[in-house]
Amino acid sequence: MRSALLFKDKSVSFIKRFAFSISYVLLPATLLCTFFYLLSITQYSTTTTTYRPSFSSPHPSLPSTSPSFSSERDKVYHDSCDYSDGEWVDDRSGPLYNVTTCGTIKESEKCISNGRPDLGYLYWRWQPKECNLPRFEPLTFLQVVENKHVAFVGDSLARNQLESLLCMLATVSTPKLVYKSPNDNKFRRWHFPSHNANLSLYWSPFLVEGVERSNEGPYYNTMYLDHVNERWARDLEWFDMIVVSFGHWFLLPSVYYEGGLVIGSLNCPDLNHTEMDFYVPLRKVLRTTLSSIIERKRSEVDVIVKTFSPAHFEGDWDKAGTCLKTEPYKKEEKEVEGMDAEIRKIEIEEVENAKAKATEFGGFR
């Protein structure tokens, strides 16, 4: 990511500005979750894998919209900066949008409307140690993605990130919901006529082909580790940016297929399959996903892989937790360890492998 190679000026401008904007967009989800780990392959809180003639440094150079930001942005982008190394600081300026009135967030996910008694969680801002991180500017973001298509692919965290982003963007431009899958909200697309920009949501918690467990069907998930989910992959040619989020569904009882055969299962003792942990399937799924993007997407595309987000509500994913914390974790309070650390390690390794494959496959210099 620190390569001195450069794209053509237009390509460099887009990826640099977008990498910064999308890294800041992911932070609101972090605040709501108390803490949240984004993938850092070199030093950065968000990893942008670019399948182009070279990799650019993810240090954006956003145009200043007011004189007051000019010197700050010169400071931010003059040198390298690790956005992931920092701390939450109190910020009385508050959130960019009112969650009680934003139409893209479900009623069940609106903390204030559902009786959350404290408001302190709304007044935190992430501050990197090495540089200043300017406040997110919705209009600037829309200018960056003008004539572009951004896809959020994966689980509920991908959905949460997109919904939060839409709430912020809606403060300056009204999005139009141009597509919604019948009977559910798992696949949606919004269009911003003001900038001819599209943002899409693709529900795909496994990233690959699979069948989700249900009350009416098997108690376990079924995953086909070597077949990418065509529900989103068939639209690859239209994407300029893909944000990938997955992980928590792999903790549930599952049966794994590869090459058309069952290779094992997780927590399904009555099926008489080979018991295996979920680390190998998780690695295979991410490898299948990134390989499919590399092999199919011939034009420019940028990929952001979000690492596994540890549980943040002091309970299992489908059980009510206590939610006693009212402030973010301090650095010394929480370590990435055990299962969380292992999943993160796998994700980092697979993104590095994908970067190498992209260079070889695409004839990169």
Image: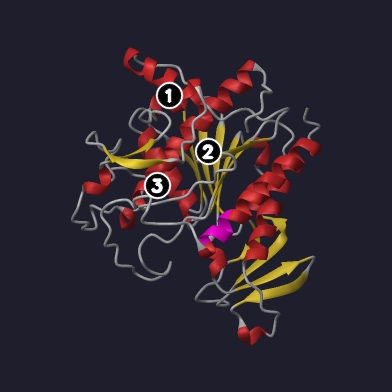
Magenta stretch bounds = 340-344
Judged left or right of residue 187, residue 35 is left
Q: Position of residue 196 (x, y in %)?
A: 51, 26
| Residue 277 horizontal/vertical position (percent) | 63, 71
Residue annotated with mark 3: 29
Relative height, residue 171 to residue 204 (above, below) = above
Of the two numbered discs 1 and 3 in the rendering, the one whose residue sits closer to the viewer: 3
Vertical comparison of 311 with 245: above or below: below
Across and down, in percent, residue 246 comes to 55, 55
Image depth: mark 1 or mark 2 in front: 2
Q: Which amino acid, mark 1?
A: Thr
What is the distance, in whole Å, between disc 1 and disc 3 at their CAs? 20 Å
The three-letter code of the residue at mark 2 reads Tyr
Q: Nearer the viewer, residue 352 or 148?
A: 352
Label 3 Cα crowd, 10 Å radius (few <14 / some 14-19 / many 20+): many
Up/down of 117 relative to 240, above or below: below
**Position of 75 compared to 304: left or right?**
left
Extreme residue in the front direction: 332
**Disc marking residue 140:** 1
Magenta stretch: residue 343 in it?
yes
Q: Which residue is mark 2?
A: 44
Query: Can the viewer see residue 197 in this picture?
Result: no
